Image (spheres, helix red, strand yellow):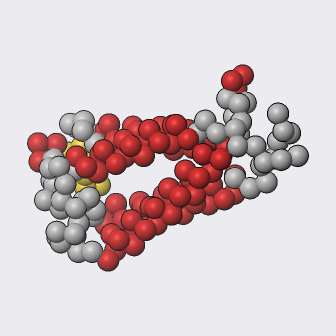
Amino acid sequence: MTTSDQTSIRGGRRTSVQTVTLAVGAVFLLVGILGFVPGITSGVDQLSFAGHQSGAMLLGLFQVSILHNIVHLLFGVVGLALSRSWTGSRSYLVWGGAIYLVLWIYGLVIGHESPANFVPLNTADNWLHFVLGIAMLGLGLLLGRGHTAAKA
C-alpha cells in the first residue's frame, strides 16, 4: 500500500477530503459572486476596489470590496481545481486554514480605519476568518490522515 496522489473522480469515487474541498470551494465561489449582487450586498454603489472606505456589506454584516470579492472567487476556483486529488484537497484545506488564521491575526492587529486595512476587514470578518481557519485546518488534518490506496 502506498499513498496515492490522485483519486479517481470518474465513476463517483471521491474521498471525504475531496468532497469537503469541493463544497468549500463552491461556497467561496458563491460568496465571491454574491459580494457583487445588490440586495444580498448592501451599498454595492459604495463598493471600492480596496481599502477600509468600502461601504459595501455582504449580508449587511461583512465589509467587502472588489478585491475582497476577487479573493473569494479565486479561493473558490482553486478549491474546485484542487478537489480533483486527495493531495490537492488536503493541501487546500490545511494551507487555506493556515492562511485564514493569519488573516484573522492580521485583522485583530490592524486598525479597522487604518490604511493597512486594504482588504477590508471588520470585526465580523475577523471572527469568520478565525472559524474558517480552525474548521479548514481541522478538516484537512482529520480527513487527510491515513489515506492509502493500492498502487495503480
Relative vertical location of residue 143 with respect to residue 14 in this rendering, above or below: below
Residue drawn 50% across and 56% down?
A: 96
Asked whether, in this view, residue 19 is left or right of residue 132, the answer is: right
Residue drawn 70% across and 38% down?
A: 6
Question: Residue placed farthest to the right in the image?
Answer: 1
Across and down, in percent, residue 97 comes to: 51, 59
Across and down, in percent, residue 8 comes to: 71, 30
Residue drawn 55% across and 41% down?
A: 82
Any part of residue 139 in sight: no
Residue drawn 86% across and 39% down?
A: 150
Snapshot quadrant of residue 53:
bottom left
Relative vertical location of residue 37 with respect to residue 140 in this rendering, above or below: above
Question: Residue placed farthest to the front in the image?
Answer: 152
Quarter in which the C terminus is drawn = top right
Question: Residue placed farthest to the bottom in the image?
Answer: 109
Asked whether, in this view, residue 150 is left or right of residue 42, the answer is: right
Across and down, in percent, residue 45 comes to: 11, 42
Question: Residue placed farthest to the top in the image?
Answer: 11
Snapshot quadrant of residue 44:
top left
Across and down, in percent, residue 19 comes to: 62, 39
- The mark tally for this picture is 0
Asked whether, in this view, residue 4 is left or right of residue 67, the answer is: right
Any part of residue 138 in sight: yes
Asked whether, in this view, residue 137 is left or right of residue 122, the answer is: right
